[in-house]
Amino acid sequence: MLLLGTYAFAFGKTTPLAPGWLFGSLLLLLGVMATNVEVLVLRPLRSLLQMTQSLTRSGSPGAPVDAPSGQMRELAAGLNRLRDRMEQYESELSEERSRRKALGQTVRDLEDRYALTVERANDGIWEWNIESGSVDFSLRWKAMLGLARAPMQGVEDWRALLHPDERAAVLQYLENYLSGTVPRFDEQYRLRQGDGNYQWVHSRGTAIRHASGTPYRLIVMDNDIHARKQIENALIQAAEGLSALSGETFFQALMRSLSTILDTRDNLVCLCVGEPPVRARTLAYYSRGTFTENFEYDLEGTSCGAVIDRKEIVYCPTGVCELWPSEKEFDRDSYIGVPMFDSTGKIIGHFACMSGKPMRQDLPHLALFRIFSVRAAAELERTLLRQQLEARHTIA
């Protein structure tokens, strides 16, 4: 119709209806074109615009875009892929937020536990930022040394507190640890207190290192071992003082020294009786500041019997009566017993220190008591040998 009207109008063959046909045809053509533009262009573009707007907002990216074939469909497919990827990223981001939230709570819990542990622990802690040189000394550490009001901020302040006799060795040991020459920093040394006296500490440090192994932070925990060191020194001095004694005099001096150093009430050194030993006979019994007559007693069910049976040091700082109910008769709460062996390795006796109150939890290393054990065993073996020789002479 449109072509016919155009032909008639062009060649002069018009009719009264020709202009109307032409106008109607143009309107029809415009309508078809508008419909095509709406369906093929505007509607997909609105969908694409809606999706792009939803992609820029938080939340769901929206529904997939549909478009007819052609370049618009390719563009819609690309946006749909982008939508799917955005949904995946949003899901991963949500999971990451949850993980970070849980991790943050875990870190806060650990920080609270760390602070509580530091507060309740007997250790003083200091942290050295190796890169900046600054040091953070805990209040507990300062109080332990009587330096609560001392202005301490750098590692040089700590170095200045080291005892002159140990400063070089401690600093060299620390340098070896930081350089990786030794696997740990674990040392005992003296630090100067606020009153000028020196205090023994047991220092244990851990370095935090970069991936290259270079340390950038050092965390050190210092434990007050001054009282224990005093006992150690007293034991060593007592051992040296006993070297010139022998026989009963030696055993009595040993019991008196251990009672004074350990602050124990009942102290005895015994000879095993029987084969295998079922009884013990005291060679010296020092109780409440005096020596009493020697006696024999059964080992079964006693703390001393445990020393003989196990052939090792038995140390119970408190609760003796719970382990050996027979000790209730003597009102004992703490006990340390040390076996004695002859030159062939056979157990021949033991010595023990007991008290009606708890014993120190931080006794010196038990190896020190073995020093007394060896010395007492040698004296006991010599005494037994002398008795055997005297018995032979009597028979002869």
Image (cartoon, rainbow, N blue to C red):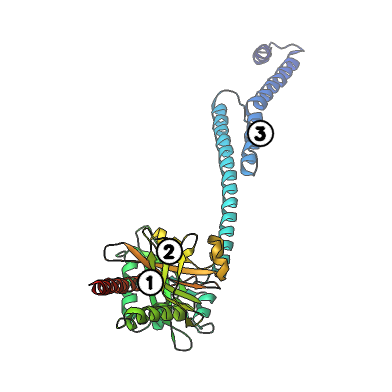
Give amino acid for label 1. Answer: Phe
Does the residue at mark 2 contact the one at mark 3 (Cβ under 8 Å)? no
Q: Residue at label 2? A: 279
Q: CA distance from mark 2 to mark 3?
A: 104 Å
At label 1, counting other C-alpha atoms closer than 10 Å, the crowd grade (few under 14, some 14-19, many 20 or more) is many
Residue 189 locus on image (x, y percent) = 38, 77
- Residue drawn at x 40%, y 68% as measured from the top left: 338
Counting the numbered discs, the total is: 3
Residue 364 in view of the camera = no
Residue 254 location, quadrant = bottom left
Q: Nearer the viewer, residue 61 or 259?
A: 259
| Disc 2, SS | strand
Q: Nearer the viewer, residue 9 or 184?
A: 184
Q: Residue at label 1? A: 369
Of labels 1 and 3, earlier in sequence is 3
| Disc 1, SS | helix
Of labels 1 and 2, earlier in sequence is 2
Q: CA distance from mark 1 to mark 2?
A: 23 Å
Camera-near label (1 vs 2) is: 2
Residue 321 location, quadrant = bottom right
Camera-near label (2 vs 3) is: 2
Q: Residue at label 3? A: 46
Name the side, left or right, on which 44 lies relative to 178: right
Task: Report the residue that reaches farthest toward the left.
Answer: 396
Task: Report the residue that reaches farthest toward the bottom.
Answer: 195
Q: Nearer the viewer, residue 139 or 230?
A: 230
Residue 149 in view of the camera = yes
Looking at the image, residue 67 lies above or below residue 370: above
Camera-near label (1 vs 3) is: 1
| Disc 3, SS | helix
Does the residue at mark 1 contact the one at mark 2 (Cβ under 8 Å)? no
